[in-house]
Image: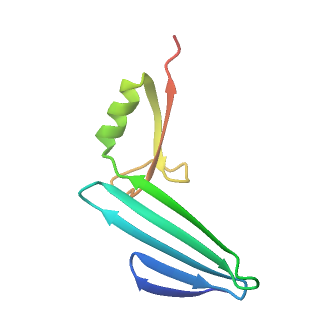
Amino acid sequence: MYDEIVVDPCHRAWASYLHHFTISSVVDPAARAGDTRVLVHRTADGDTFAEQHRQYFHTGAQVLDALLDAGLALTAVTEEYSVRPADAATLRATWTARRDPE
């Protein structure tokens, strides 16, 4: 299916007979941010597509304070892409909030 090449924990590449994928990440702990670049190369015609993502890392207290300051009420904190409640082992979480009815 895919052959995976792991260069280091922040650089991974996969290949199939149709595509070559590369994901590279750089994390700046002091800035509490990370940049990830995804590169997809179609082997049949050489077409290439790239996208870049920036993520900021916030404490739970910072997220909750921002939601409350915006007048929102917290309704759930779950593990990312699931309905399982977040816990101490959760690496990435989805925070769901709504405006309080007036």
* Residue at far right of view: 44
Percent position of residue 30, x then y? 23, 57
55 relative to 52 in the view: left or right = left
Determine the residue positioned at 42% across, 86% down.
Answer: 7
Determine the residue positioned at 76% across, 85% down.
Answer: 44
Percent position of residue 97, x then y? 49, 32
Percent position of residue 17, x then y? 71, 88
Quadrant location, the N terminus: bottom right
> Eyeballing the image, is 36 above or below 4?
above
Q: Nearer the viewer, residue 80 or 65?
A: 65
Q: Nearer the viewer, residue 43 or 60?
A: 43
In terms of image quadrants, where is residue 55? bottom left
Q: Nearer the viewer, residue 48 or 96?
A: 48
* Residue at far top of view: 102
In terms of image quadrants, where is residue 2? bottom right
* Residue at far left of view: 30
Determine the residue positioned at 53% across, 15% down.
Answer: 101
32 relative to 15 in the view: left or right = left
Percent position of residue 88, x then y? 33, 53
Determine the residue positioned at 70% across, 76% down.
Answer: 47
Q: Nearer the viewer, residue 48 or 73?
A: 48
For the image shown, how many numbered marks are present on the structure? 0
The colour mode here is rainbow
